[in-house]
Image (cartoon, grey):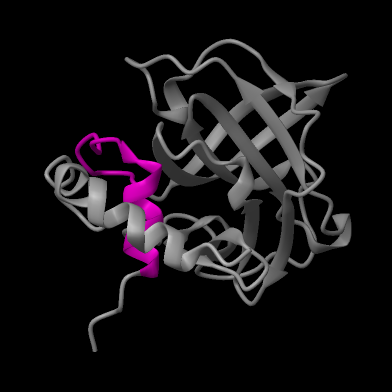
Amino acid sequence: MNWTPVLISLFMIVGPVAAMQIEADPRSIASFMDKSLTPELDILQVATDISADNHLVFQVKTRGEQINGKNSDYLLLQILHEKTYLLLLPLNKEEGDKILIYEGTLQPENHKLSKITGEFKEYNLSADFTAKRIVRGAEFTVPLDWINYGADFNFDAYTIQASMQGNTLQINKVYDQARKGRKEEKRFSAITLLNKICSPKKR
């Protein structure tokens, strides 16, 4: 099923209300360069799109790449959507492209990864979630059918040092955050994000 006409139709109904709730374009994050970090740890941008096979795509770009190095360093996409979902890909290319996915309880007053406490358990319903490496970064995808369009949606990206104990994720260090240095972003609805992506882009 092609979701684009459906999303545009829904936007005609809920778009004006949703648009009043956001102040910035929810489709992307432009991050500040941090030259104190090595290039593979420095996030420059996060952009979103919809693929031809009906997946929401998150493209995370960094200033450089890591061919080898610490096996405990990861590029992480955080999705806040009813719960907290963490999608991880090793920065070390020698570790391959296996995606790791964890979930945790979403605390409304505490959305920043560096301040989140508690445990993140392995997410077992992740068969259609994927990740792949691109030049200086990675692409993460989630199926559109997984999204609850009536719920809030937000995302961020990080480079981190982490360890796994059984099915539990332990975040040991945060190197960089795409939204670092910004005021707390207002949360927006999933339908707002999807309709922004589907709307014609200005030239």
Q: Is residue 124 above or below residue 12?
A: above
**Magenta region, residue range:** 179-198
Quadrant of the image containing the C terminus: bottom left
Q: Is residue 33 visible?
A: no
Left or right relative to 142: residue 19: left
Rendered view: 3 above or below 183:
below
Residue at (54%, 27%) from the top-left corner? 84
Q: Give coordinates of residue 156: x percent, y percent.
A: 44, 44
Q: Is residue 192 magenta?
A: yes
Image quarter (top left, top right, bottom left or bottom right) of the N terminus: bottom right
* Residue 145, placed above or below residue 42: above
Q: Residue furthest bottom?
A: 203
**Quadrant in which residue 58 is drawn:** bottom right
The percent position of residue 168, horizontal first and vertical second, equals: 77, 19
Q: Would residue 136 be counted in the magenta stretch? A: no
The image shows a total of numbered marks equal to: 0
Question: Which of 6/84 is in front?
Answer: 6
Q: Is residue 63 left or right of residue 7?
A: right
> Which residue occupies 23% across, 36% down?
186
Q: Nearer the viewer, residue 31 or 172?
A: 31
* Most foreground residue, 113 or 38: 113
The answer to which of 108 and 21 lies nearer the viewer is 21
Q: Position of residue 12 (x, y in %)?
A: 24, 56
Q: Where is residue 74 drawn, in percent x and y? A: 67, 46
Q: Is there any visible trace of residue 72 in the rendered image?
A: yes
Q: Is residue 103 left or right of residue 157?
A: right
Q: Residue at x 41, y 31 (%)?
A: 151
